[in-house]
Image (tube, helix red, strand yellow):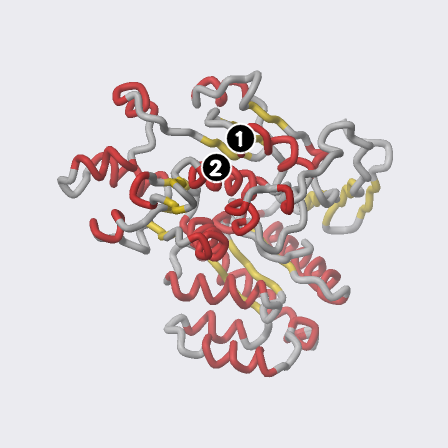
C-alpha cells in the first residue's frame, strides 16, 4: 500500500515511483535525554566528545548501564546502536574496578560483527574511545590474526561469526583461555558464569523469537524502535526498467544509474552504487567512467584538487590494483570483499574524506559501515 504523497514519473525506458521522506510524528518516548556529564568518571571518559545520549540510547540507558540483564535492541540504521553497545561495554568495565583501578585481567568483551569491513571500523571506533581507559581493543578476523599472548592481553575482541566459530571450536589447546572468552549460551548454562549477551539489530519482524533465543527478559531487556526513531527521514525511489531483452535491460540500468549519479553529484553529494557481484563493481565503475568521457562530463566526477587529494592519489598509486588506481583518478572507486584489506581500508578512508565521489560496492558496505553517501 503506497502513501498518498507518492510521485510517479514515466519515460521511454523506465517507470519511476518516488516516496518522499516524511517527518516522523512526535514521540512520547525518550524525550528526556541523558547528559554525559551526569555519568560517572569512566562513562564520561568513554563518551568524551558527546554531550548527551540520543533518544534511543536514553531509553535503553538504565538497563544497559545499570544492570547485567541480557539485551536485544532493534532500531533503524543510523539510530545509534553502537553507543548502546558502548553503554554495555562501560558497564562491564565498571564491574571490575577496585579502589579506582580497572582490573583488566578479569574480563573479556567480544563484539561479533557480521562483516570484516564492519569489524575493522568497530575496532577503530571502540579503540579510540577506550584507549584513555587503558582498554586494549583488537580485531580477530580472517585478515587479522592474534597470538595466544595477544588474545590474553586484550580486553575487547572484535570478530566475525565465522572466525569466532573457529576460535571457540579449535582453540590453541589452552582450555582456560578459550573458556574465558567463549560467548555461548552453553557456556553460560554449564559454567554458571556471568556472561551478558547484548544483541543489536535493524528492525526485524520476529524480534520476540530472537529475544527468547538470546534469553532476554522481554519486560526488561527487549527494546524495539520502529522507523519513527530514524534520525534522518528516508526518501525512497523505485525504478522499473521496461525493456524485455536482458542485454537491453542491462544497458538501460547503466544509463539510469549514470543519470542518477550525475544528478546527485551536481548537487554536491557523494553516491554509493550497490551491485550483486564482485566483478560487477569494476564493470559498473568502468562503464560510468566511459559514459562520462563520452558525454564530456568527467569534471562532474572529479573531486576537488587539494593538497589532501594529492596525498591520497600518491597513496593509492602504490596499490597493486591497477583498476582501482585508474578509477581513483576520475573520482570513482570500487569496494568488495575480494580486494586486499589495505585497498579496502584506503577506499573507505578516502570516500569518507570526500576524495571518491562515486563508490561502486557489494553488500559488504551495507552491513553498517558508516560512510557519508547521500544516495
Horizontal placement of 289 versus 117: left or right?
Answer: right
- Secondary structure of the residue carrying tag 2 is helix
Task: Look at 48% across and 57% down and name the residue there.
Answer: 128
Which quarter of the picture shows residue 303? bottom right
Task: Look at 26% across and 53% down and name the residue there.
Answer: 150
The answer to whether residue 340 is above or below residue 312 is: above
Residue 178, how many percent across, how many down? 23, 37
10 Å neighbourhood of mark 1: few (<14), some, or many (≥20)?
Answer: few
How many labels sit on residues?
2
Residue toward you, 88 or 265: 88
The answer to whether residue 179 is above or below residue 111 is: above
**Residue to which mark 2 is pinned:** 91
Residue 82, how many percent across, how many down? 54, 43
- Secondary structure of the residue carrying tag 1 is helix
Horizontal placement of 67 versus 267: left or right?
Answer: left
Task: Look at 52% across and 55% down and name the residue there.
Answer: 361
- Residue with the most extreme right position: 5
Horizontal placement of 18 versus 299: left or right?
Answer: right
Look at the image and tell me in which quarter the N terminus lies: top right
Residue toward you, 251 or 158: 158
Look at the image and tell me in which quarter the C terminus lies: bottom right
Residue toward you, 12 or 278: 278
Are the residues tagged 2 and 1 within 8 Å (C-beta)?
A: yes
**Residue to which mark 1 is pinned:** 66
Which quarter of the picture shows residue 239? top right
Q: CA distance from mark 2 to mark 1?
A: 7 Å
Task: Look at 65% across and 31% down and name the residue there.
Answer: 59
Q: Is residue 54 visible?
A: yes
Q: Is residue 278 visible?
A: no
- Residue with the most extreme front position: 99
Amino acid at each position: 500500500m503506497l502513501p498518498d504523497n507518492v510521485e510517479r514519473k514515466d519515460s521511454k525506458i523506465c517507470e519511476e515511483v518516488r516516496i518522499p521522506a516524511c517527518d516522523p510524528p512526535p514521540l512520547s518516548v525518550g524525550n528526556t535525554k541523558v547528559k554525559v556529564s551526569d555519568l560517572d568518571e569512566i562513562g564520561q571518559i568513554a563518551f568524551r566528545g558527546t554531550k548527551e545520549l540520543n533518544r534511543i540510547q536514553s531509553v535503553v540507558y538504565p538497563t544497559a548501564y545499570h544492570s547485567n540483564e541480557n539485551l536485544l535492541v532493534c532500531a533503524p540504521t543510523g539510530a545509534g546502536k553502537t553507543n548502546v553497545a558502548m553503554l554495555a561495554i562501560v558497564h562491564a568495565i565498571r564491574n571490575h574496578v577496585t579502589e579506582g583501578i580497572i582490573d583488566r585481567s578479569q574480563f573479556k568483551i567480544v563484539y561479533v560483527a557480521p562483516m570484516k569491513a564492519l569489524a575493522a571500523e568497530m575496532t577503530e571506533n571502540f579503540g579510540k574511545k577506550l584507549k584513555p581507559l587503558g582498554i586494549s581493543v583488537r580485531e580477530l578476523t580472517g585478515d587479522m590474526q592474534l597470538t595466544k599472548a595477544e588474545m590474553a592481553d586484550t580486553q575487547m575482541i572484535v570478530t566475525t561469526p565465522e572466525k569466532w566459530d573457529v576460535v571457540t571450536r579449535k582453540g590453541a589447546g589452552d582450555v582456560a583461555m578459550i573458556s574465558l572468552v567463549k560467548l555461548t549460551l552453553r557456556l553460560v548454562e554449564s559454567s554458571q558464569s556471568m556472561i551478558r549477551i547484548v544483541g543489536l539489530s535493524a528492525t526485524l519482524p520476529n524480534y520476540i523469537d530472537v529475544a527468547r533465543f538470546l534469553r532476554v527478559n522481554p519486560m526488561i531487556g527487549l527494546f524495539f524502535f520502529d522507523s519513527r526513531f530514524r534520525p534522518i527521514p528516508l526518501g525512497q525511489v523505485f525504478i522499473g526498467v521496461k525493456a524485455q531483452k536482458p542485454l537491453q535491460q542491462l544497458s538501460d540500468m547503466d544509463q539510469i544509474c549514470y543519470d542518477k549519479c550525475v544528478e546527485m553529484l551536481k548537487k554536491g553529494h557523494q553516491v554509493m552504487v550497490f551491485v550483486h557481484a564482485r566483478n560487477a563493481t569494476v564493470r559498473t565503475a568502468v562503464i560510468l567512467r566511459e559514459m562520462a568521457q563520452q558525454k564530456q562530463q568527467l569534471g562532474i566526477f572529479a573531486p576537488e584538487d587539494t593538497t589532501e587529494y594529492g596525498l591520497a592519489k600518491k597513496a593509492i598509486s602504490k596499490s597493486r590494483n591497477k583498476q582501482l588506481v585508474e578509477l581513483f583518478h576520475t573520482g570513482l572507486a570500487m569496494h568488495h570483499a575480494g580486494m586486499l584489506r589495505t585497498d579496502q581500508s584506503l577506499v573507505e578512508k578516502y570516500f569518507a574524506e570526500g576524495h571518491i565521489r562515486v563508490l561502486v560496492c557489494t553488500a559488504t558496505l551495507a552491513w553498517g559501515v558508516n560512510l557519508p553517501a547521500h544516495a
